[in-house]
Image (spheres, rainbow, N blue to C red):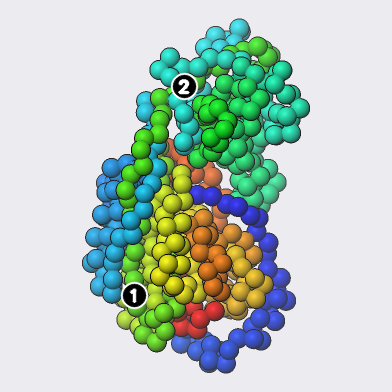
Amino acid sequence: MRFNSQVRTLAVAAAAAAALALPAMAQQKQPADSTVIRQFYDNALTSYDSYNNLRYLTKNIGGRLSGSPQAAAAVEWSRQVMDTMGLDRVYLQEVMVPHWVRGDKEVGQIFAKERGAVDVPVCALGGSVGTGKQGLSAEVVEVHSFEELEKLGKKHVKGKIVFFNRPFDNRLVYTMQAYSGAVDQRGGGPVAAAKLGAVGVIVRSMANELQDVPHTGGTRYKDDVTKIPAAAISTNGAELLSSMLKNDPKLKFHLRMTCETLPDVKSYNVIGEIKGSEKPEEIIVVGGHLDSWDLAEGAHDDGTGIVQSMEVLRLIKKLGIKPKRTIRAVMFMNEENGLRGGTKYAEFAKQNKEKHVAAIESDAGGFTPRGFGVEGTPAQLAKVAVWKPLLAPYGLNDFEEGHGGSDIGPLKGQGDITLIGYLPDSQRYFDYHHTPIDTFENVNRREMQLGAAAMASLVYLILEHGL
């Protein structure tokens, strides 16, 4: 999962002003809309279909890194599930994806005079090169910013492992903002360090809390810069390494990783569709990403988003709704380490001259719903926020300007599309994000189903009234 911008709460006055502009038809429809929304919630909260789907995806298939056999199994599984739903069309959209493999379990050890060898939890960052089977040992230089790294210069960096140790800013209420303020170390750290002659990089895990589990995630190389091994260290490990460096600045760190990148592999986006009865050419997309990192089951990231998106279609079919506009659920492939599924979907949409009205992405975990973030113009935000009175009784109070989603992002600029990100409560998300503990057991069924009902409700309103 990625986040590219900070969110900003919509002023109440703006929403009130927008409500005055609500079409008369929509205002007349509000009692009926309220009834439909209530039915969505009643059905979702008493159903176990989506929860059982998540159980199968996580327990029977597991981690689904792009290019892996598990990712291929997830494609076929999601196609089969949607085939049983009585949709108008279920189909695959071919996309070539990267195939990076982690290899053996990584080794991280601190060698200091007063303590000898100390094991610390590490994991390779996605896309990293390996160290070779013998591993890599070098002195460590700790930095907290790219500016600090540049000031050190080649004299103090060359031949060393750079340790990026900037923590989350826990003063920020929205943890996504804290993530955005730290994740550049993971994405750009290896290139910045390699330019100054570093031989490796260790990055503090992207997490709010002190934990013993490392958090993986993608990193980026440049063709004209030497590729050096890059690993994440758990937050507790980062605290320990930092304190030991203060006592022994000459300590060494041993890192062993056997990861490698193999040739690209053919994969697919999986799409289920219900055709609109009145304006079938107007398309609303709801989706999440089918791939996940390989360390665990990918339950919150993004198994919940996948099953919630399919649940939207199930709820529409269950209630016998004949949508006026076309609704698609898209299971995007390769969000985590390439975004090729989202890019390919947008390419096909442009090639086929499709008219997308809105796209809603669920990729922030299966926690209690708070609202929606809208990536678009103030007018687009106001159009979505006008439905707040219908949704607020279900705890949906946050209608914000913010990031719609990584997979739907490539659709931006294709007509007057509104990009919307589903916003659950974010306080626990980074406990599990990209870790071995992102498992089915850490997903609460009611929270997840509340989210599915929230998404279905907003989708229904757009299907009925447009944007």
Q: In the rendering, at what x and y percent does residue 267 appear?
A: 32, 50
Density class for disc 1 (Cα within 10 Å; few <14, some 14-19, many ≥20) is many
Count of residue discs = 2
Residue furthest top in the image: 113
Q: In the rendering, at what x and y percent does residue 276 appear?
A: 37, 81
Q: Residue at x 29, y 64 (%)?
A: 91
State the residue in front, 2 or 192. 192
Q: Tell me the residue that label 1 is attached to.
A: 274
Q: Please indicate whether residue 274 sits to the left or right of residue 116 in the image.
A: left
The amino acid marked with disc number 1 is Ile
Say if 210 sits above or below 368 in the image. above
Using the numbered discs, state the Cα–Cα distance from disc 1 to disc 2 in whole angstroms: 49 Å
For the C terminus, the image quarter is bottom right
Q: Tell me the residue that label 2 is attached to.
A: 131
Which secondary structure, mark 1?
strand
Q: Residue at x 56, y 24 (%)?
A: 200
Say if 188 sits above or below 386 in the image. above
Q: In the rendering, at what x and y percent does residue 168 appear?
A: 64, 41
